Image: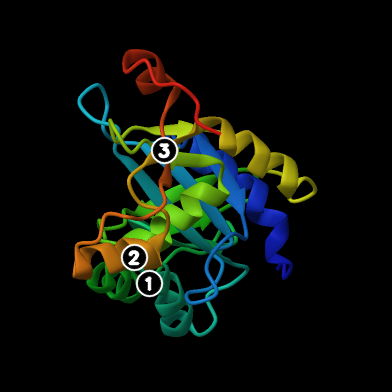
Amino acid sequence: MKEDKKMWYPLVEEFLKKDLECFVTMKEVGSAYVGKPDVLGARDIGGRWSGEVELIAVEVKPNRNSFGKILGQALGYSLLAHKCYLAVYLDDDEEFSQEEKEMANRLGVGLINIGERCCKEILSSQHHAPIETLFLNIIDTMGYNRCNFCGTFFQFKKYTAKSPKKAVEMKREFLYSAPMMDVSRKRKLLFTGRRDMDKLKLLVCPECIKALHLHKIE
């Protein structure tokens, strides 16, 4: 039995990319409020009709000990992701019991069987409704943001923990002026109606920058 769950992260990432068609994956990224899923993946579900993106969170475990507890841990990630999975390493002669499948199905958590060389989806996750700010913060960390004009998600940086300052500088390339400055001033404007505020900088994708003939405002 393998007890170091991190050794299975690459297999889970490969599964998210090949089987669930995620365009980006990342390990151990999350929120101080919810925790950090072992593996995260984002995939396009809007197709040609919209820019909608779905976030998938996976909790990886080396065994099925305390199954109800680890299942609840995976479910907790529904606060920041649209789909949640519990991925467990199983020997060749093992499989999830019917009771475990029913428990997972009741909570809307998907099950993934981790083998020696690949992963297999045993039960699909139900679609959850994450908290918008948590979801967007995770997507931002993964190097993507939603355009404030067209709503499409676009990549603004290659995230690396070693160069956060450079990543922020790259992000600034897509910032353009708008009527409000930050959340506190935005809320003040909503309650007071005051218009004498500084300007907020919104993220705009390259396509909208060209289509709307926007000019950079420093």
Applied colour scheme: rainbow
Is the residue under label 2 in contact with that under label 3 (CB below 8 Å)?
A: no
Say which quadrant the C terminus sits in.
Answer: top right
Give the mark toward the camera: 1 or 3: 3
Q: CA distance from mark 2 to mark 1?
A: 6 Å
Mark 3: give few (<14), some (14-19) or many (20+) Cα within 10 Å: some
Give the mark toward the camera: 3 or 2: 3
Q: Is residue 206 left or right of residue 29?
A: left
Of the numbered discs 2 and 1, the one sitting upstream in the chain is 1
Height in image: 105 above or below 46?
below
Height in image: 102 above or below 52?
below
Residue positioned 54% across, 64% down in the render = 30
In this view of the protein, which residue sits in the foreground, 148 or 112? 148
Say which quadrant the N terminus sits in.
Answer: bottom right
State the residue position of label 3.
177
**For the view shown, which residue lies furthest in the front direction?**
196
- Secondary structure, mark 1, is helix
State the residue position of label 2.
109
In this view of the protein, which residue sits in the foreground, 69 or 152? 152
The three-letter amino acid code for the residue at tag 3 is Ser
State the residue position of label 1.
75
Is residue 80 visible in the rendered image? The answer is no
The three-letter amino acid code for the residue at tag 1 is Leu
Is residue 32 visible in the rendered image? The answer is yes
Q: CA distance from mark 1 to mark 3?
A: 39 Å
Residue positioned 21% across, 69% down in the render = 192
Is the residue under label 1 in contact with that under label 2 (CB below 8 Å)?
A: yes
- Secondary structure, mark 2, is loop
- Secondary structure, mark 3, is strand
